[in-house]
């Protein structure tokens, strides 16, 4: 059974100034998500699920179907697509939250939105991050050969130095592993920057400043799970809501869920290495840098131009 790719594309892009998941960045108007889909299908993924917001769902869906709605896997089978929305009110039955809250619940909540449309091992990625071909190849291979064991997950680990933004501080899940390459701890750190003296520093939840080595393994929200993750995560989300019911900004993060499952003995998470450089559009200033990188990758022949052929698209008017 082919794995599924779950794309988190519901972010509002407050720091970016717009819907970056729909912004044209490639030489022929491609979005970052388009490159991820291309690499994922090439790596053996058979279904793509997008988490979006209701207000732009139809526009987003039409764009996807028009560009590659008839795409086929390397073995000739059609790629499947699904679209699910993340909204603030979508919380487990019997839970409550502050009615004044406007901020979404975060990445781990977004993943839960797909629990009814995924029944295979699946990957989770951000819609505004570029991960690289080798990253998808490693993840697709691992998920494609999964033995079905519950609680056996994976994460693609990037080197911190390959994930920094020249435009400002970033948030990263700082990872530690055991001798067998399994994750032992992941801690979300914020405002990670390279300082003028060359050091890299960031701030965990507790507020203190930490210094990190360039080679530190970090999570870029590129995970591999099995469907049992949904049940475990939803239980943790219920606890989160009990503790944060009156909070207006507290968020439910994937690294926090994985960390709790590991420490409770309910899960193991293999860290897969990747040589790839990450890049993305956190800030508006990142856009020209990302556009230049996609132009370079295209000129080097890493990607075709255009990324998708005309016969992979679908006439929306005939397929409503």
Image (cartoon, grey):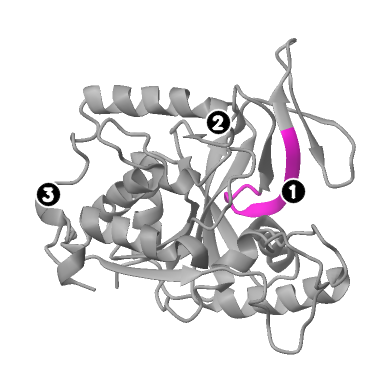
Q: Earlier in the sequence, mark 2 or mark 1?
A: 1
Q: Main secondary structure of the magenta part?
A: strand
Q: CA distance from mark 3 to mark 2?
A: 30 Å
Of circles 1 and 3, the one toward us is 3
Q: Are marks 2 and 1 in contact (CB under 8 Å)?
A: no
Residue 236 as seen in the image, left or right of residue 120: right
Identify residue for label 1.
Answer: 187
Q: CA distance from mark 1 to mark 3?
A: 44 Å
Is disc 2 surrounded by few (<14), some (14 to 19) or many (20+) residues within 10 Å?
Answer: some
Q: Which quarter shows the C terminus?
A: bottom left
Q: CA distance from mark 2 to mark 1?
A: 27 Å
| Foreground residue among 267 and 31 | 31
Residue 99 as seen in the image, left or right of residue 214: right
> Residue at image x 72%, y 73%?
237
**Residue 95 x, y percent position in the rendering:** 77, 83
Q: Return the mark for residue 284.
A: 2
184 is within the stretch colored magenta: yes
Residue 244 as seen in the image, left or right of residue 149: right
Q: Earlier in the sequence, mark 3 or mark 2?
A: 2
> Residue at image x 15%, y 70%?
318
In the rendered structure, which segment of residues is drawn in magenta? Answer: 178-191
Q: Which quarter shows the N terminus?
A: bottom left
Looking at the rendered structure, the secondary structure element under dot 1 is strand
> Residue at image x 32%, y 52%?
37
Identify residue for label 3.
Answer: 310
**Residue 76 x, y percent position in the rendering:** 11, 63
């Amino acid at each position: 059974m082919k794995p599924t790719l779950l794309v988190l594309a519901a972010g509002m892009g407050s720091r970016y100034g717009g819907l970056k998941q729909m912004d044209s960045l490639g030489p022929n108007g491609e979005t970052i998500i388009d490159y991820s889909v291309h690499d994922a299908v090439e790596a053996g993924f058979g279904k793509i699920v997008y988490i979006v917001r209701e207000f732009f769902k139809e526009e987003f869906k039409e764009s996807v179907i028009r560009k590659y709605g008839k795409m086929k896997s390397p073995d000739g089978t059609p790629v499947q697509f699904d679209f699910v929305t993340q909204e603030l009110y979508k919380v487990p039955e019997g839970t409550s939250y502050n009615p004044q809250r406007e901020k979404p619940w975060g990445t781990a909540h977004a993943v839960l939105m797909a629990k009814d449309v995924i029944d295979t091992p699946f990957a989770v990625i951000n819609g505004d991050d570029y991960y690289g071909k080798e990253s998808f190849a490693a993840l697709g291979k691992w998920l494609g050969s999964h033995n079905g064991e519950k609680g056996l997950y994976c994460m693609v680990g990037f080197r911190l130095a390959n994930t920094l933004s020249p435009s400002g501080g970033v948030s990263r899940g700082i990872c530690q592993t055991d001798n067998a390459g399994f994750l032992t701890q992941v801690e979300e750190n914020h405002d990670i920057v390279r300082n003028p003296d060359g050091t890299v520093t960031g701030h965990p939840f507790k507020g203190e400043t930490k210094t990190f080595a360039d080679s530190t393994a970090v999570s870029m929200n590129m995970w591999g799970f099995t469907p049992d993750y949904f049940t475990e995560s939803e239980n943790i989300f219920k606890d989160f809501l009990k503790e944060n019911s009156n909070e207006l900004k507290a968020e439910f993060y994937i690294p926090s869920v994985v960390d709790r499952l590991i420490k409770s003995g309910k899960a193991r998470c293999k860290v897969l290495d990747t040589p790839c450089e990450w890049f993305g559009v956190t800030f508006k200033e990142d856009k020209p840098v990302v556009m230049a990188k996609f132009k370079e990758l295209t000129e080097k022949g890493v990607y075709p131009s255009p990324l998708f052929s005309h016969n992979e698209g679908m006439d929306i008017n005939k397929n409503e």
